[in-house]
Image (cartoon, helix red, strand yellow):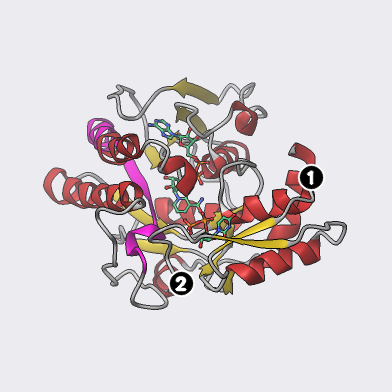
Amino acid sequence: MPTLREKTILVTGGAGFIGSHLCQELLRERGNKVICLDNFFTGSKDNIKDLLENPDFKLIEHDVTKPISLENIDQIYHLACPASPVHYQHNPIETVRTNVIGTLNMLDLAKKTGARILQASTSEIYGDPLEHPQSESYLGNVNPVGIRACYDEGKRCAETLCADYRRQRKVDIRIVRIFNTYGPNMHPNDGRVVSNFIVQALKQEPITIYGDGSQTRAFQYIDDLIGGLIKMMENNSRFWGPVNLGNPKEFTVKELAEKILELIPESKSNIIYRDLPSDDPKKRKPDISLAKEKLDWEPKISLEDGLVKTIEYFKKVI
Ligand code: NAD
Ligand code: UDP
């Protein structure tokens, strides 16, 4: 990968799962100066411990819902927001505040500094989709008063803010819609399906399938996503998105459980069934034609290869 001109890059949510991989890539592999801003709600210093000694890395403990003044920033990757249903439903009002006020603050910072800002949006903005696979032109099916709305509607409003800051205040924005992503540095207890199943299998605990396991998701390995995020940020055309970033290979949740058990043959865990949470999307799979066309991007890592790396990680940390 060619080294890009050294830039000063702010990563909000930089101590989280995706943010820590992004900080690492931007700093170590691409020689930028990186400022990681995080309030450690779901992130952890462990995720960035190897970066803390680097003179080109700076950590700011701060909540994005409070304004912040920084200078000489070239790019902002705005990731700060809890991503797992368990965490974003823990304090839903705070989740809305983080998405709306937090994004307003980061857009104001982008306006003041002239930085380009990339908004980490989500496939959740499609809700429980009535179109399959989901392309960017699909406008979604979200229950505005359900338990997932704090996240879904919060992220939809954040996209609206980005589009309006672009039109009204000429801020240079990029929007990516991230589909289910997994890999090392996920929090072992954050409740997402890949981390839950691997941790349960390694601890010889029952694998908890919610519902009958026929709901589908398409799982993207973290390295593929990081490549896509940077391509979208570095794209200097007029294309600002929104663009889907995800792996289009679709699996049922039951298939995922079986695959993980296959990859951990020493596990004696059995599968148990629990109630499906309300508004849980029945299917999800990205149409990535736009990312292929505009960014020449598509994921390369198979579910099996990605799971093997993720299982190795969890064996070390739990
Ligand atoms: P994560 O929970 O591991 O990371 C989120 C980070 O943001 C954490 O470090 C947390 O401490 C920080 N944070 C939360 N609220 C904050 C606040 N108010 N101020 C400052 N920092 C705050 O989640 P992740 O999986 O790394 O997700 C990162 C981003 O990507 C999120 O915006 C999420 O919505 C988006 N996303 C993730 C996925 C996925 O599958 N992982 C899918 C779609 C979208
Ligand atoms: N899920 C499950 N067991 C778990 C955790 C999640 O069956 O222990 C299901 C969940 O109901 C959903 C899917 O797996 O249908 C993906 O859940 P996750 O929380 O990872 O992400 P999201 O629902 O946001 O896609």
Q: Are marks 1 and 2 in contact (CB under 8 Å)?
A: no
Residue in the image at 57% along x and 38% along y: 20
On the picture, is 21 further left or further right than 304?
left
The residue segment tinted magenta is 104-128
Residue under pointer 2:
283
Residue 315 is marked as 1
| Magenta-span inclusion, residue 151 | no
Mark 2: amino acid = Lys
Disc 1 to disc 2, how far (Cα)? 30 Å
Q: Is residue 107 magenta?
A: yes
Name the residue nearer the viewer: 25 or 163. 163
Q: Please, is residue 261 above or below residue 31 in the view?
A: below
Which mark sits nearer the N-terminus, 1 or 2? 2
Label 2 CA crowd tier, 10 Å (few <14, some 14–19, many 20+): many
- Is residue 272 depicted above or below 25 in this figure? below
Q: Secondary structure at mark 1?
A: helix
Q: Is residue 118 above or below residue 47?
A: below
Give, as a three-letter code, the residue at label 1. Answer: Lys
Q: In the current view of this chain or complex, which residue is farthest to the bottom? A: 132
Q: Residue furthest right?
A: 266
The residue located at (54%, 43%) in the rendering is 22
Could you tell me which residue is drawn at 42 percent across and 65 percent down? 281
Query: Would you say residue 227 is visible in this rendering?
Result: no
Residue 63 in the image: state x and y as whole percent.
Answer: 37, 26
Give the quadrant of residue 30.
Answer: top right
Q: Quadrant of the C terminus?
A: top right
Q: In which quarter of the view is residue 1 placed?
A: bottom right
